Amino acid sequence: MDIDLMMRVYPFFLEAAWTTILLSVLTALLGLACGALGAAARLSRFTSLRLLGATYVSIFRGTPALIQLFILYFGGPQVGIQLDAFEAGVIGLGINAGAYMTETIRGAIISIDKGQREAARTLGLSQFQAFYKVILPQAARLMVRPLGVNLNMLIKATALVAAISVVELTYTAQRYIGSTYKPFEMFLLAGVLYMIIIYATGRGVSWLDRKVRIT
Amino acid sequence: MTESNDFVQIRHAQKSFGTLEVLKDISLNVARGQIVAIIGPSGSGKSTLLRAINDLDALTGGEVWLDGVQVNKKLPHRQYEKHINEMRQQIGMVFQHFNLFPHMTARENVTMAPKMLKGLTAEEADALAEEQLDKVGMLERIDYYPSQLSGGQKQRVAIARALAMKPKLMLFDEATSALDPELVGEVNQVMKKLAEEHMTMIIVTHEMDFAASVCDRVLFMDQGVVVEEGPPEQVFGNPQKDRTRAFLRKELDETE
Ligand SMILES: Nc1ncnc2c1ncn2[C@@H]1O[C@H](COP(=O)(O)OP(=O)(O)OP(=O)(O)O)[C@@H](O)[C@H]1O
Ligand SMILES: [Mg+2]
């Protein structure tokens, strides 16, 4: 194993790791927004909205994220959507992650005992007041761990945007393999950096989960 | 209104879940300050009737009136929501499984709705929480979370939460059924206290002794109809109907 080479290219990988982190953060935020909207639609009292939410989830969970990215980035210009690779990566992965988060958020909300809503409504709270004072604060606590799983998956999925040439970790590894012919060292370096990002994120999620847990 | 001598009126209540008819033309009047117990076998429709009073389960037919106002008025959706929220503020309800809000302390459980719906200030809300929790003997535990309380304590906080809205009517759906036997007494005691203060109450219960000692009237329900009703001495001491006798005999056997 060529440790020397690894030490030499390491700073470039570190820079690429920052791109991966930025990509993950933006994707997570967009995913959370899409997930919240998706869950609201899935739980709506209007059939048309419920159908819309269900369709969103089944389309984006039912096809490979890579195909979704390709359609957006390569197919987009054909229908007048011009995005640079980074934008396409964030939007494509964000909408994809949102489909998974829709189910996570919805799952947490419907797992709250219906007696909670009944107790709130009995006191005279409106549907909306009962939701944001009683249901959501409890559901939000339950969401932390499963959303952490979504986050973990999403970070790993950012590797896919190498295929549309966003210069993040995986793409950088591939590029250096082209010039060094050392795939083992290059992918190992990328892998270690992914692991550090994911480990730190996991710790953060565990910390948040403990912090918000009901005593 | 001439007939509003009766504080709570249920007129020809009918309720079906799909094809299952759970309430079959039930009428009931309760005067202000009166305490009515509803007894009957499991599945007879007691909870459904109680939950129809505050429209938690909407009736498929009939009317519910409280203090001269129809609770289940026919109104367009938005107007109805506003109306029912106002009515529910006047009707306290206590559930078998307490349904305390686990993310709030006892104090917050009690003050949340009054703050939100009646615009109480923080000081007013605190005073209210102390008053209500003191009344149910839970003042020392005011800043405890539900998970730190026993079943009986939880139920007393739940009663305080309902009372904090200053309801005109209290509904109890088997408030002591989920409690360990040794914790039943403390909740019953609180309910007795309310009775002494002439709170109007409708109490669904399996505890015949309690019903006999606290209630002015007992209703025996079976299969969605009121089979027999009257003062406790009569319903328990001298039941007129076979079904009532059979039910009471069975209940007595179980408690012995
Ligand atoms: N949401 C519902 N959907 C369908 N059926 C229901 C629903 N709620 C109650 N029922 C049915 O209505 C009937 C009466 O139920 P209810 O809960 O009012 O009985 P109960 O007298 O309170 O019984 P228990 O003593 O066991 O609490 C039962 O047969 C029950 O299965
Ligand atoms: Mg019941």
Image (spheres, helix red, strand yellow):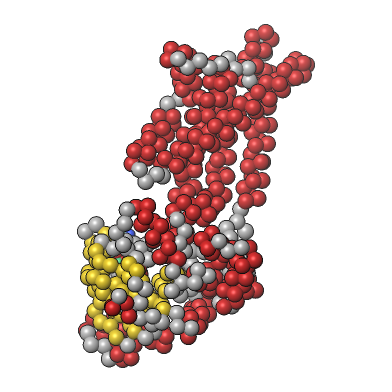
The quadrant of the rendering that contains the N terminus of chain A is: top right
Q: Quadrant of residue B33?
A: bottom left
x then y, percent, for residue B3: 28, 78
Viewer-proximal residue, A154 or B162?
B162
Quick check: A179 above or below B31?
above
Quick check: B164 above or below A52?
below
Q: Quadrant of residue A10?
A: top right
Q: Residue at x 52, y 25 (%)?
A: A91
Q: Would residue B205 be visible to someone looking at this image? A: no
Q: Would residue A74 be visible to someone looking at this image? A: yes
Quick check: A99 above or below B70?
above
Q: Quadrant of residue A203?
A: top right
The quadrant of the rendering that contains the C terminus of chain A is: bottom right
Q: Residue at x 53, y 17 (%)?
A: A83
x then y, percent, for residue A178: 64, 9
Total count of labels: 0
Q: Residue at x 53, y 20 (%)?
A: A88
Q: Is residue B70 left or right of residue A41?
A: left
Viewer-proximal residue, B42 or B140?
B140
Q: Is residue B170 left or right of residue A158?
A: left
Single out the residue that lies furthest toward the front: B1
x then y, percent, for residue A177: 65, 12
Viewer-proximal residue, A105 or A177?
A105
Q: Residue at x 31, y 83 (%)?
A: B248
x then y, percent, for residue A32: 54, 36
Q: Is residue A178 left or right of residue B109?
A: right
Viewer-proximal residue, A189 or B247?
B247
